[in-house]
Image (cartoon, coloured by chain):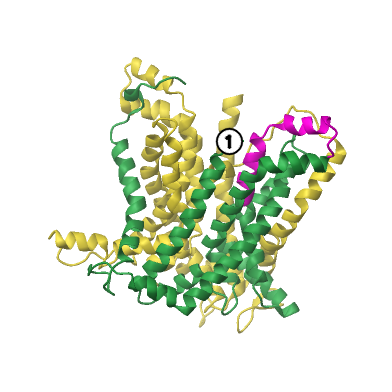
Chain colours: A yellow, B green
Amino acid sequence: MSAVEMAPHGADTDKPKAPRGDIAWRWGLVAPALIVLLLAASGPLLIVLVYSFLTPGNFGGVIREFSTDGWFQVFFTRDIFDETVGPATAHLDIFRRSITLALYTTVFAAVLGFPTAWFIATRAPDVRPIWLFLVTIPFWTNLVIRTFAIQEVIRNEGLVNTILRSLGIISAPIQMLYTDFAIMLGMAYVFLPLMVLPLYASMEKLDFKLLEAGYDLYATRLKVLWHIVLPLVKPGFIAGSILVFIPAIGAYVTPRILGGGRNLMLGNLIELQFGQGRNWPLGSALALTLLVIVVAALMVYIRATSREEGRRHG
Amino acid sequence: MGKRNFSVASLPGFGTIAIITFIFLYLPIVTLVVYSFNEAASMSRWEGFSLRWYEAALANRQVQDVSIRSLVIAGWAATLATILATMAALATTRNERRFPGQTMIYALINQPLMVPEIVTGVALLIFFAMIKIATGYQGLGYLIAAHTAFCIPFAYLPIRARLETMDLTLERAAADLYATPLQAFRHVTLPLLVPGILAGFMLGFVTSLDTVVITEFVKSAGQDTLPTYMLGQLRRVVTPEMNAISTLFLLLSLIAVTVFFLLSRKKA
């Protein structure tokens, strides 16, 4: 539902212009919401930018002294003994792991989400909202609880290991919790609805007569899927992938619970700088780097969808 | 669209994967709920049905505190966000053409959905730390403000959706019958909008209850909400008491979401 509507809309053109007094009235009505958003969501992002160029204080916070060390430390380390500069391998590893895990999560969610969306879109129209609702229910329950639920299933004494042991398939539990696999599985679990909803939205509009035409022309199922279905549901596919990738790359709760203390992702690295690390400028620079990655992903999405729109209308 | 030929729409294996997906979605939650009724303290075996963990959870003073705090914050945030979102939705719908700045307004309203929660959390941690030093105020206001901003897009979506499907001629008819704009709003628009407003409130309420990362960064000492309390507890040894708390919380979310679902399906 909402995930689909969150996507930016193309501007509607060629319609009559609104009178000037009307516009003032509209701005007045929307102003309180904008003020709250500017104060408690958007505005503080600028302060993060300022902080990323300051010097860390001894007990957290900052000293008002310009420094580029925060940004430098994101990518490089300076040897304490001979001052040689090298790449910040620990940070770069975490960047790589975060991006890889977010990509795996997206692929896994797509593998499960595509058939699921298809299944829902091919039900009778009156039962479709109920299937969709079933997909969204887990999504509206608390993230901590959902991650905890996954933990219950994959723990050493959890559901999967208990069943496998009682069936005699394994003798010792398989270590799944506190691994990268656990993080990926958990993120796919919590973000799956974000893949299903936009996919469903584009499949619902699909003209099934086109598939019929394909079959009439002796196309195989695979060919119909590849040459007819996939190009038509591409916008939903792109939207779903972006909607899963963005929260996955910035995930904090899921890696913290399922990855234990060792398997860090970007979100945990950022938190570390504001906690034990006491390096707010580095934390700010890392947070902005994450934001840049997310904005880049969004740009790809906007470009891809506007091209699709253009093709459809033009 | 007419009646579909089923064999045309069916793709081999898709139904099976869909069923697996639904099992994947619900199995962990069902496991969690089932084990909340387990007599045993360890989750490795089932020792019979018991409500002892619910009794333990409900008698736990800390759980009571954090639950009440969560509900207070969610109540405030959802109410404020719904009022602000209703005004914003009224301002950004029912126009034939986008007015100057409308695209920017959309971007601002949707901003909390686009920026990762951890980035917003960090930004608010820094900003509120400055205000705390300047004013000395340490109360719940920071969490309420942060949650309100975060809930605005969620409250806005169903309200805007409702307004967009509403019949504009009714408002014009009221105006034709010499109703002032305020009267037309009060007696025509508002009553029609109520399901959208309630849906927005429900969605905002659930969103606030669900917000973990922002709360984790904004809260002062002793301001844990239920999700941040649980997050802290999960680091330690977990007893089925956590399952019981989760089940109760799940039930609350489920009720709110079901109400939202029913309200948003109501025809305008």
Would you say the magenta stretch is mainly helix, strand or loop?
helix
> Is A163 situated above or below A13?
below
Is B174 contained in the magenta span? Answer: yes
**What residue appears at the point 36 percent right and 38 percent down from the top-left corner?**
A115
Give the x, y percent position of residue A110. Answer: 40, 44
**What residue appears at the point 66 percent right and 70 percent down from the top-left corner?**
B142
> Is B60 situated above or below B214?
below
> Is B69 situated above or below B210?
below
Quarter of the image holding residue B237? bottom left
Q: Residues within 10 Å of mark 1 (few under 14, many from 20)?
A: few
**What residue appears at the point 45 percent right and 30 percent down from the top-left corner?**
A231
Give the x, y percent position of residue A243. Answer: 51, 48
A150 sits to left or right of B108: left
Of all residues, the one furthest to the left in this rendering is A168
Confirm whether residue B60 shows in the render: yes
Q: Quadrant of the image for the C terminus of chain A? A: top right
B176 sits to left or right of B266: right
Segment tinted magenta in the rendering: B155-180
Q: Which residue is mark 1?
A: B267
Q: Amino acid at mark 1?
A: Lys
The secondary structure type at the circle numbered 1 is: loop
